Amino acid sequence: MLTITGGSRRLRVQVDNETGALSVEGSAKLHDRHSGPFRTLVTLGESTTAGGWSSSRERCWANVLADLISDFQDEPVTLVNSGIGANVISTRAPLYEYSGKPAASERVGKHVIAHDPDLLVISYGLNDARGGTPVEMFREELTSVITAIRAECDPLIVLPGPYFMTDFTSYDHFGFANHAIFESFNFVTAQVAEATGCLFVDVYNAYGGAEWLVHHDGVHANDLGHRVIANEIFKVLAQHCSGLAARTKRIEFETEPWRDESVLMADYGYESRGRPTIGLPPGQT
């Protein structure tokens, strides 16, 4: 039997040894992680979280994500961007001396807990991988950061893996990684998310290996890359947080029909059956 996990469902696939026929059984949906609107979003991370080389603040993935969330709520979410360039996960990181300080483990008090978020994105891995942090040390320190935060507040925590990048050789002190190492950090981040009850977002593979999503510096996301990151995080939130659907579900019963395909149908000699009634096919009332 093969188990396939995708989106919010798990599929169990069984093969009949005699006929080769497949039978597929779907499991129940995963539990709802947040049934209300989000109030405060904090993004804790590195330079790409801070904005990297996006062409404006509004195009940074953190801002795009906040806008996506706000678009589906009655009230906008408040964004607190706590990204620092060249940041690493903790003072134990070999690169700490050359990093942007304070490290994540040093700054959760003022930069996360003080804002009492109900949604927190912790985005690390890229600089630690490039700076030679052993992946098991990264696992321990990321887990410790999550534990420290949850001792004081209880946000829904999202863990993106490292971003995709292309230049592993041009930066002093940051030359210890390659794509294989990034994949190991991505895998460990997913394991930490599962072990700690966080949501994992595979932003590394969301790039699809497309180098044109990376700024010419070879490290940071460009505007299009930031949009892909935000969209991928929002997709995972939408799959696990029914609160993001509350406004949409409510206005399903209030929205006036706006579709009109009469001209397209008339192009081929068909008459329109009128605009659809809410909840019914065209022509039925």
Image: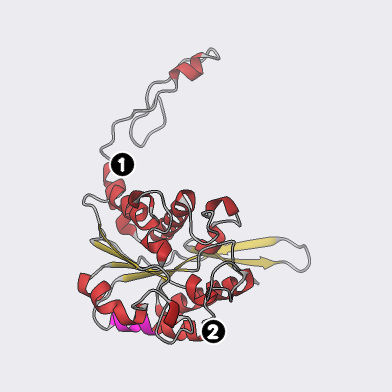
Which of the 4 quarters of the picture holds residue 43?
A: bottom left
- In front of the other: 215 or 58: 215
Label 1, on which residue?
252
Residue 117 visible to the viewer: yes
Q: Residue furthest top?
A: 269
Q: How is the image coloured?
A: secondary structure
Q: Residues within 10 Å of mark 1 (few under 14, many from 20)?
A: few
Which residue lies at the image location 40% right of the left edge and 85% below the top edge? 91
Callout 1 amino acid: Glu
Find numbered disc 1 in the image and state the secondary structure of the residue it sits on. loop
Tell me, yes or no, whether the highlighted magenta stretch contains residue 152. no
Residue 267 higher or lower than 206, as above or below: above
Find numbered disc 2 in the image and state the secondary structure of the residue it sits on. loop
Q: Is residue 164 left or right of residue 235?
A: right
Q: Are marks 2 and 1 in contact (CB under 8 Å)?
A: no
* Bounds of the magenta segment: 144-150
Label 2, on which residue?
134
Q: Residue 244, how many percent across, how many down?
A: 32, 55
Q: Residue 242, how many percent across, how many down?
A: 33, 58
Q: Residue 267, how many percent across, how many down?
A: 53, 14
- In front of the other: 255 or 213: 213
